[in-house]
Image (cartoon, grey):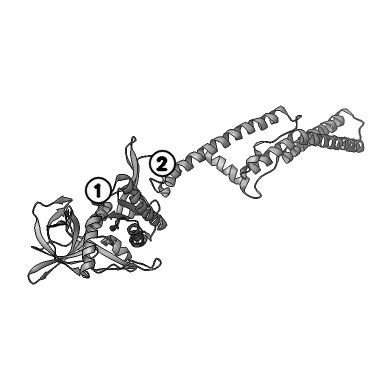
């Protein structure tokens, strides 16, 4: 039934295939039917006379046929002319007006809802016009309400899901059902370093406003690079490239997007500092792999999500980054290695993985994006300063019970060069606290990540990247570095 309807609409829309109108159909139908009837009468009359009139000559029969033919022609002409006027006024013109109005209505002319026909038109045609008006009014009302509802859904849920995902769910007949599809996508995960500690220093309302400003900037960049924000958990963003439509440029766009996010955060931090807020440090991890994309959950509660080991790997890569770093997994690197400049690969042994995790720190993206990660002060530069401290390893967010003593050698804006009693493996997170107080002020916990370890005069010297420090402690260290320099 639907196929026949589609075929009929296609024929009507195709030029030259509209067929005959009601005017041609009625007039031709009347003409041919009268002609057939009169032809039958002519043949019957001639046959009857030939059989009953024995004196009739062929010439008589010929002229008799001519007279009947002329009479038939007059009758046909009379009937066609009179019927044509009658049908045109009563049926053809009203139907043509309805058809023309419908064609204009198809062109989105809503003024065509109201149309009038003459009072002497047949009752059925007047009923068609009246019914049409009521039906169209109802359809327009329902369509407007549905359009408002769809726009509301797109606007509201587009703030929780990507607008592309919302459109995909609304336009797909199966969009609301639980289930997913396996796809190869590129996952981007970003996270603010030391966010938990930072949130403890602000009241909730200020913290939310502060965080929303950061998220707004990051979200705009992700959308600009045609990524999908799948989830926001506090300060962490999970974005997907390749959903709902896959593109060969997904891995490169994800990497370019990450670099743009880091550069934008540098600019945003200048604004934060001017307004008295602390600067933020963000790490980003990227991985490409196969995931299941779709509605996850139950009929009671569900969410559109990506699930798979590729997501977990991206999270592990991100956990090994330091502030300002963009790291891509080996699967992503293999796809874009000719278009990016990266540092030497780093190898991590992660719990739960059978083989080492290899990742590359991105420095520059080539054409068509041509974007470079903004340079930061080298860790080795800074001010020589000896401050004693104790530190603890942080493994899986659990702080080790055994403290290790150490002493700073050099301090910079967000890095520490320190001598620690025994070597701590690179990329290990640590908590350190200074063993002294200044004018009734005692330093709170400082969190950092070990970047490298070198031995100097038999003492392990560590390069540490600060990931979390309270603003008041930062201000004191900045003041000391200023005096010392």
The quadrant in which residue 326 appears is: bottom left
x 33%, y 37%: residue: 301
Please identify the residue farthest to the bottom as the structure is shown.
Answer: 457
Q: Residues within 10 Å of mark 1 (few under 14, many from 20)?
A: few
Residue 356, position in %: x, y? 18, 60
The spot of residue 133 in percent (x, y) is: 64, 33
| Image height of 34 relative to 181, above or below | above
Foreground residue among 107 and 276: 276
Which residue is disc 1 drawn over? 200
Q: Which one is in front, 271 or 291?
A: 271
Give the label on residue 435, or none: none
Q: Residue furthest front?
A: 439
Q: Is residue 460 visible?
A: yes
> Which of marks 1 and 2 precedes in the sequence?
2
* SS state under label 1: helix
C-alpha span from label 2 to label 1: 44 Å
- Specify whether 230 is left or right of 58: left
């Amino acid at each position: 039934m639907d196929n026949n309807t589609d075929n009929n609409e296609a024929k009507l829309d195709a030029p030259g295939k509209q067929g005959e109108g009601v005017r041609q159909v009625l007039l031709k139908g009347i003409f041919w039917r009268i002609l057939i009837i009169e032809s039958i009468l002519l043949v019957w009359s001639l046959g009857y006379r030939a059989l009953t009139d024995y004196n009739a000559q062929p010439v008589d029969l010929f002229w008799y046929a001519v007279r009947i033919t002329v009479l038939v022609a007059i009758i046909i002409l009379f009937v066609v002319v009179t019927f044509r006027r009658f049908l045109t006024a009563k049926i053809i013109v009203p139907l043509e007006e309805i058809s023309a109005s419908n064609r204009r209505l198809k062109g989105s002319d809503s003024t065509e809802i109201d149309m009038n026909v003459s009072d002497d038109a047949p009752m059925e045609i007047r009923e068609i016009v009246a019914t049409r008006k009521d039906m169209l009014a109802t359809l327009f009302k329902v369509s407007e309400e549905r359009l408002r509802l769809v726009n509301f859904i797109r606007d509201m849920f587009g703030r929780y899901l990507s607008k592309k995902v919302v459109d995909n769910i609304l336009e797909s007949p199966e969009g609301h059902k639980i289930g997913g599809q396996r796809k190869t996508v590129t996952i981007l995960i970003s996270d603010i370093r030391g966010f938990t500690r930072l949130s403890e220093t602000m009241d909730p309302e200020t913290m939310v406003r502060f965080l929303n400003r950061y998220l707004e900037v990051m979200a705009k960049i992700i959308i600009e690079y045609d990524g999908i924000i799948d989830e926001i958990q506090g300060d962490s963003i999970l974005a997907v490239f390749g959903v709902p439509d896959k593109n060969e440029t997904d891995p490169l766009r994800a990497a370019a997007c990450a670099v743009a996010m880091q550069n934008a955060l540098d600019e945003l931090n200048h604004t934060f500092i001017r307004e008295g807020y602390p600067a933020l440090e963000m790490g980003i991890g990227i991985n490409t792999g196969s995931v299941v994309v779709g509605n996850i959950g139950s009929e009671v509660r569900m969410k559109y999500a990506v699930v798979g080991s590729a997501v977990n790997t991206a999270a592990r890569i991100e956990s090994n980054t330091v502030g300002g770093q963009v790291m891509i997994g080996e699967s992503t690197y293999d796809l874009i290695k000719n278009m990016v400049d990266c540092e030497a690969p780093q190898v991590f042994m992660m719990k739960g993985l059978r083989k080492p995790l290899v990742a590359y720190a991105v420095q520059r993206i080539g054409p068509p994006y041509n974007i470079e990660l903004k340079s930061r002060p080298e860790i080795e530069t800074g001010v020589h300063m000896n401050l004693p401290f104790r530190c603890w390893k942080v493994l899986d967010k659990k702080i080790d019970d055994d403290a290790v003593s150490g002493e700073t050698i050099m301090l910079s804006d967000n890095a520490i060069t320190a001598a620690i009693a025994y070597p701590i493996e690179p990329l290990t997170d640590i908590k350190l606290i200074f063993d002294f107080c200044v004018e009734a002020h005692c330093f709170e916990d400082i969190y950092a990540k070990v970047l490298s370890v070198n031995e100097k005069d038999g003492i392990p010297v560590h390069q540490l990247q600060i990931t979390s420090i309270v603003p008041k402690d930062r201000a004191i260290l900045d003041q000391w570095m200023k005096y010392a320099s």
